[in-house]
Amino acid sequence: MNNDEAAEGKELEVKIYSIATSMTESIIFLDETTGTRILPIWIGPMEAQAIAIRLSGYPSPRPMTHDLFFSLLKSLELTVEKVRITDIVDNTYYSVIQVVDRDGGNRRDIDARPSDAVALAVRFGCPIYINERVFEKTQVLSKPITEDEVVKFKHDLKNLKPNDIISQLLNTRHHPSGGDAGENGDEDEEKEGENEGNEQT
């Protein structure tokens, strides 16, 4: 590892472990491929649907937004080489999409929400990486070890609502809900403020 890589922090490859969704919010679980940690990131239901549809293998009758971006990039002879979730600040996750031209000589990083980055990653079939500092800054889950534990864990994730997962799996009152560039973080703060006001009256 060179000095620049050390300064940036180690990046670890992850894969999609599971997706839990409700009418109002969803959680995508990213599994550390060479370790035991699973990172939950709160995303919007539409983005979760875009990821799940692609993973299911069933084509959408009409192009969804991420399908459109996929087609546009391909038509411009560009491809997504990898996506990187780089940091979390004030409950907001940051990520970049690394785009490269056909010859591989021109690379550029494009700022994106993790949900959009992952939705494009599954369409291009490219790897997903998370910076080690993200694991250090937020709540993580431990991966089940035995096959029976894996089956039960995935079954529980599919049947629990996101709020249940927050209380039962993360075991914390406050959770990193601003997973997509503050999508939910400000809204949750407003709701908490309203609740506090109601309790005082």
Image (cartoon, rainbow, N blue to C red):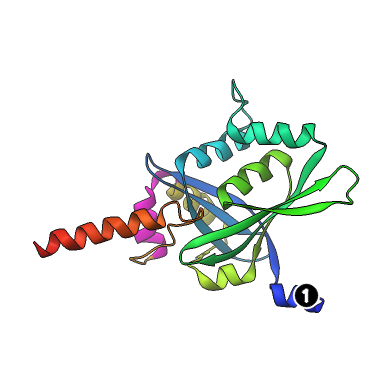
For residue 8, above or below residue 51: below
- Three-letter amino acid code of the residue under disc 1: Asp
At a point 58% along the width and 59% down the height, the residue shown is 94
Is residue 29 shown left or right of residue 80?
A: left
The spot of residue 6 in percent (x, y) is 74, 77
Crowding near the residue tagged with mark 1, few <14, some 14–19, many ≥20 C-alpha atoms within 10 Å:
few
Residue occupying image coordinates x 62% and y 36% = 66
| Residue 38 sits inside the magenta stretch | no
**Helix, strand or loop at mark 1:** helix
Q: Quadrant of residue 199?
A: bottom left
All told, the count of numbered labels is 1
> Residue 172: image x %, image y %?
36, 67
**60 shown above or below 133:** above
Q: Nearer the viewer, residue 16 or 68?
A: 68
Q: Which residue is mark 1?
A: 4
Q: Main secondary structure of the magenta part?
A: helix
Q: Position of residue 160 (x, y in %)?
A: 38, 48
The residue segment tinted magenta is 158-170
